Image: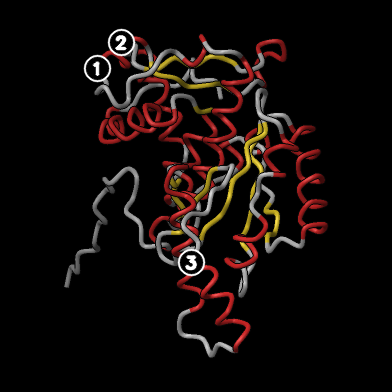
Amino acid sequence: MSTTSIPPRRRSSHFEAPVLHFLAQFRAATGHQLAWALWHADGRHPRHCIRLIGRLVEQGLLTSRPLDPQVGAVSRHVLTLTAQARAALPPGLSHPDPWDEPRWMLEHRLARTNVSILAGPRGWEWIPRRELGQRLHRAALDSYRGRALNDSDRAYQRRLAALQEIQLPCDGLVQRATGQIMLVLEVRPGISLRGTIGRLPRHPLILAGRFRAYEIAILGADPSAVAEAHSALERSIRRRQLPLTVRAIPHYRELPHPREWGKAPASVYRQHGLPSPLGYRRPVRRAVDGG
């Protein structure tokens, strides 16, 4: 999303801090992703985002670089914090320039950002990997409560309760309102896809999925590798009879240009009981009764 000809607007100043925080959190995002997460999903028109990006670039706080410069003006632009902006971050958010990393790592970050912006407004949040097994164990035990259990169900429940730990070779998301867990497998260089799928623990997952299957998504920047992983994972699920269903996640390059969106009919955040990521909204003008 090119920003070179966008005139800045002072009324966007309320939104500077959320934009900078967003990029500090994710390190890199396309302009499409930023506009989707903070504007469109919140029921706002993305034109204000486009203007604000232009101003932050002019102020030396953001860099906007084409992801695919060889295709010219149609390339998506990747937004990152400048060295000046990163120097002001607290230690927990400080990070090197993502453009200094290998290209595959930058694109993998964009793929992970895409999962976050599509799932986050609907109440999903990432679970630290060290906590994932414990959270899945707790959610699985909760699924047995309040049901009329037969002898077989109670046997499964006892075996599940006796498990010390569920070790999972993947990341995960939790739905805040329901506690539902979604597993996320990464596909990237340095990770053995076959090994990761093979380490999905069959016995604990069967106990945990007694009453419902858990969703599992595939996170990756290479569409062909993701498609291969999707097929391999579905074959493994059928062969091992795992209570999992594969959830497709759109590739970050499939996100349309913001000019094609228009204004969303309502805030997805508000529909799921979450605060606006931008906070500020212009007060509604009320009609004055002249009588």
Q: Which residue is mark 3?
A: 162
- Looking at numbered disc 2 in the image, what kind of residue is underneath it? Gln
Q: Which residue is mark 1?
A: 88
Q: Which residue is mark 2?
A: 84
Q: Are marks 3 and 1 in contact (CB under 8 Å)?
A: no
Mark before the other along the chain sequence, 3 or 2: 2
Residue 6, picture quadrant: top left
Q: Residue visible at 18% across and 68% down?
A: 290
Residue 271 percent across, percent down from the top left: 42, 63
Residue 130, picture quadrant: top left
The image quadrant where one finds the N terminus is top right
Query: Is residue 272 rendered to the left or right of residue 200?
Result: left
Q: Are marks 1 and 2 in contact (CB under 8 Å)?
A: yes
Q: Residue visible at 52% across and 58% down?
A: 181
Q: Label 2 crowding class (10 Å Cα cut-off): few <14, some 14-19, many 20+?
A: few
Q: Is residue 143 above or below residue 21?
A: below
Mark before the other along the chain sequence, 3 or 1: 1
